[in-house]
Each structure stands twice: as C-alpha cells, then as structure tokens.
Image (cartoon, rainbow, N blue to C red):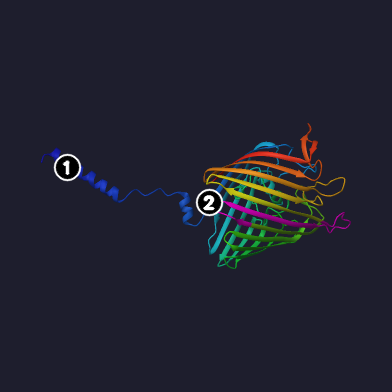
Amino acid sequence: MNRHCAFAATTTLLLVAGGSAAAADPPAAPISLSSLLAADGIVVSGYLDAAYEHQSGAGEFSSGVPDRVFDARADSFALHQAALTIAKQPQEGFGAVVNLTAGQDAEVIKSYPLQGGANFDLTQGFVQYAHGPLTLMLGKFVTLAGAEVIASPGNSNFSRSILFGYAIPFTHTGLRATYAIDDRWTLVLGVDNGWDQVSDANRQKTIEYGVTFTPAKSVTLLVDGYVGREPLAIVNNAPSAAQGQRFLVDVVATWNATAKLTLVLNYDDASQKDDSPGAVLHTYRWDGVAAYGNYQFTDRWRVSLRGEYFDDRNGYRTGVVDPSSGRGQRWKETTLTVGYAPAKSFELRLEGRYDESSVPGAFVKSLDGTGQPLTFARSLDSVAIEALYKF
C-alpha cells in the first residue's frame, strides 16, 4: 500500500469513527434560564394587555368619579397592563411570590399611601409557608372577594364589572391562613391593614374570612367577607377624620354546566358606618349582583355575556345622587365579548357594552373647552378591541 492509499484509508476510518461517536453521543442541548429556574421550582410568567376603546361619553360620572374602573378613557389606545410574576410555591416548606404590574391600570390599583406618579404597582409580594393542609401568607396579596381579578387573562371580558370596581377592594397587606379540610372544604382566615392599604390608614385591623365548598367537580361556592374600621375616604393621599366599621359579604357560585359552558353568579352586600359626631348619615350601603355565561365554541372561538345590577343607594361608591329624591343611583350594565385565540399564548377580544343609570344625567356625555362637563346622559355605550399576549 502506498502512502496515498494509507492516508485515504486512515481518513475513512476516522470519519466513520467520528460519525459513530456523534450518533452515540449527540451534543447536549443548551441550558436555558427558564430550565434552570424550573429545576429550582421557580415559575416565571407574565402577559401584555393592550386595547382601544370608544365610548359614547367622556369617561366619568356627573360626580367626577370615573364611570369605569380601568377603561375610563373615552377614545384612546392604552397599554392597560404589562405584568410579570415570579413565584416559588412548593407544597411543603417556604416560598414567595412577586407580582409586578405596569401600565394604565396600575394607577388605579395602587394602595395607600400612594408613592410617585409612575404607572407601576407591586400588586403582590408575599412569603408563604406550606405544611400539609395549611398555607400561611405574609405580605401583600389580592383580595378574596369577587368573580373577577386584576390580572387580565383571568377574566372572560375586556372591561371589568361594576362589582369589581365599585363594590370590593383590590388588595390587602397582612397575614392570611388557608386550611384545606378535604377535597370539598377550604377555610381562609386573615388579618389585614384594610382595603387597599400597604400602611394602615387608621391602625385598626380588618378581619378577612372565606369558605370554599366544592360539592362536585363542576360546582364551586365561595363565601368570603371583610370587617374592620375604615376611614370613609382617602383624599389626596390622606385618610379622612370620619371613620367607622366597614362590612362586606361576597358570594361567588361557579357551575361548569358542560365542557363548553360555564355559568357564574356573584353577589356583594356591604356597608360603611360614619361614627363622627354630627354625621349626616350614619350608615352607607351598597349591594349588587353579576351573572356570567361563557361558551367555548372551539379551541379558538368563545363568547361571554355578562349582566349586572348595582345599587349605590346612598351614593357612597359613585357619588351619583338623584337631586329630586336624594337617593343614590341604581346602575345596570350588559356586556358581550367575543374571543378569538389563534394560539394558546394570544387572544383577541371584541367587546360591546351598554350601561344605564336610574339617575338622569348620571354620565358626562361631553366636556367643554376647559375640560368641564358640558352635556349629560342617562346611558353609556362602548366598543373595544383588546389584544392579550401571555408568556
């Protein structure tokens, strides 16, 4: 064999050997940050919520209070929420959750005392300890009350309900204990600073409670509530001197009627006392009910219908009072939302909504050149399109 033949044979053997080694030991996949975090039990998630809405009104009541909790800008594009959650919540032992929200909605959900004017909110930040059926949470967390939540992906409609915005709190700061008795019963008991307060506005604490009953896989009943002494208002980042006991009872019933149809009923009843000497009214009351139906036609298409009735009988929550009777408004709304999800991480929502008040001129219809109310209306209608991306 000459030198050229020997070289060719040697080269062929090396190529075959190399190919066999490559087949036996493929290159290791690159290690990503998410896989490293997941290996340690840390979950990172988030979403972006952007929308455009057209309203027939100016976005406020005659009292000056916004007529929507989040989408109160009459004709505007908006980044409602850009949210990020980092969580480690093991079934046993210590964990923590940090939930950050940026965007237009962050201005609304900020807790007392307000810090700065940026559109940013630490919506949740708590440590937890889990042992068997008991879980303890210490820090700031979302409320127990309501059928709807702050996080946009958790709702079936674009606009939030009247009850979400005007009947219940958003968040609490304190200590919460959850105890799962069995697969059907779960109890919650906690002590908080109050409604939407990182620092307590009056030093007295608020008690929260909750009972969840799941008699069947398709049915869930939640009864929760809050009781504690609260200031009547917090204006310009300062609590009012007038105070009194505030009570809330919240009921949410959910029925997964079929694999495609979900029905929800939410009821709230609440009151605020005014113990100050010479108070014009010693007890303010509000209550309301919301009903939902969500039908999932296909993996991509769904429709959601919501109807509500809210009785702000003393005008305490919205500031709207009928001048002829001195009674607060009775506010109704109906919302229809169509959702299209071409991918699991993305959904488009098209929504139409109609609101009506018992008080003539409750809604501001237009503003003058200085931004003051010019014309008023009893009803309001709106159309919106929302894009929601989850990661």
Residue pictured at 18% horizontal, 43% vertical:
10
**202 horizontally vs 305: left or right:** right
- Give whichever of 372, 96 is nearer the camera: 372
Query: Residue 205: where, in percent of width, then height?
Result: 73, 61
Label 1: which secondary element: helix
Residue at left offset 23%, top offset 47%: 17
Q: Quadrant of residue 303?
A: top right
Q: Mark 2 Cα within 10 Å, few/some/many (few <14, many 20+)?
A: some
Q: Quadrant of the N terminus?
A: top left
Q: Position of residue 123 (x, y in %)?
A: 63, 51
* Residue 114 appears in view: no
Residue beneath label 2, please?
A: 44
Count the marks: 2
Position of residue 21 in the picture relative to residue 242 (left or right): left
Residue 347 position by quadrant: top right
* Residue found at the far left of this picture: 1
Q: Is residue 257 magenta?
A: yes
Q: Which residues are magenta?
A: 254-283
Q: Tag 1: Cα neighbours inside 10 Å, few (<14), some, or many (≥20)?
A: few
The answer to whether residue 289 is visible is yes
Q: Residue 44: image x %, image y %?
A: 53, 51
Single out the residue that lies furthest toward the front: 258
Along the line of sight, the residue nearer the viewer: 171 or 148: 148
Rounded to the nearest whole Å, what is the CA distance between mark 2 and mark 1? Answer: 54 Å
- Which residue in the protein does label 1 denote? 9
User: What kind of residue is marked 2?
Assistant: Val
